[in-house]
Image: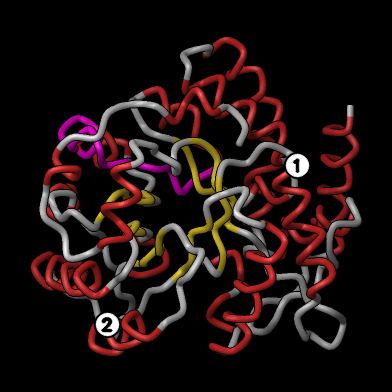
Amino acid sequence: MAFSYLFGGSINKKLTAKSHNPNAKKMLDAGINKLKGLGVAMVTPFKQDLSIDFDDLRKLTEYLIENHVDYLVVMGTTGESVTLTNEEKHQVLETVKEVNEGRLPIVFGAGSNNTAQLVKSLKTMDLNGVYAILSVAPYYNKPTQEGLYQHFVEVANASPIPVVLYNVPGRTSSNILPPTILKLAKHPNIIAVKEASGNFDQFMEIIGNKPDDFLCISGDDGITLPFIATGGDGVISVLGNAYPKLFSEMVHKALIGKFNKARKLHYRLLPVIPMLFSEGNPAGVKEIMKMMDICKNHVRLPLVTISKGLKGDLAKEFERLIF
């Protein structure tokens, strides 16, 4: 794995804490933090008839591995997971695992606003070969902080592998506040949070008070550099689908304190980032990936392909970033 020197370090409380989870204990005993750096929230390639394009999925997986990403995130928001059946999700995961051949850790999206249903599915889900699950805050039903806490404790107790919390209030209308995250960080099977609240006061409260063996990972590409500068541990990225090598270099320069070099890469990539989201994710990044011949630009409803004007703007950015 690229930049392996970043994965050292000691593990404290979670090595000694009793856990019902032998897989999590084994991971912690290894003393390796595999989710520091660049994770990519993989798109799901589709054919024109909107069936999954497994050939393009294989191509994408190999492209990401060859271009220095640190781990693969399967069936997150960017993977259009809400429009895939359970069978399709399983097929996507199995395909990525087949191509990956154990080279990189895999994180699999598993979240719901129905706690009991999610707990039941985690007890039967085939997570062999998966390093951790990414579990989004319950959406639509707007639980209290106590409800969020109890939900994630149930999820962590049920999961046979470690849990990464996913806080994205812009999508869920449910913000996991820092005191709740810090309380959950004490659970031996909760190892990180993907923080996409966009609130630096919130980020810094978590980073300044979290245990050493709990990661705070950015969920926003455009603020990854300042996020790392405050003590964050990396990013789970959309942009990385298209520009994994450039973005990985920026992330790792920042993580080792080479901010002058990281800053140059940050400002090189920054103009394209808002364009990726202006007409829906992953429609924007899929358009660039089409230009790169990695996959087609098809998305499933209710998402639609981007407008002609945005395609022109992205084409200009594509040409600029080639050189």
Secondary element under disc 2, as helix, strand or loop, is helix
Residue positioned 63% across, 60% down in the render: 42
Q: Where residue 204 appears, x then y in whole percent? A: 25, 33
Query: Quarter of the image holding residue 58?
Result: bottom right
Q: Amino acid at mark 1?
A: Glu
Q: Position of residue 263 (x, y in %)?
A: 58, 18
| Quarter of the rendering containing residue 146 | bottom left
Indicate left or right for 126 with 16 as reference.
Answer: right
Q: Does 40 appear above or below 22? A: above
- On screen, 250 above or below 299? above
Residue 202 placement, left or right of 290: left
For label 2, the residue is 119
Relative side of 122 to 155, left or right:
right
Q: Earlier in the sequence, mark 1 or mark 2?
A: 1
User: Which segment did they paint magenta?
Assistant: 206-221
Identify residue for label 1.
66
Crowd around label 2: few <14 · some 14–19 · many ≥20 (10 Å): many
Out of 103 and 46, give the one closest to the viewer: 103
Of 217 and 69, nearer the camera is 69
Could you tell whether 23 is left or right of 20 in the image? right
**Quarter of image, res 75:** bottom right
Image quadrant occupied by the N terminus? top right
Q: Residue at x 36, y 67 (%)?
A: 136
**Residue 202 within the segment the image draws in magenta:** no
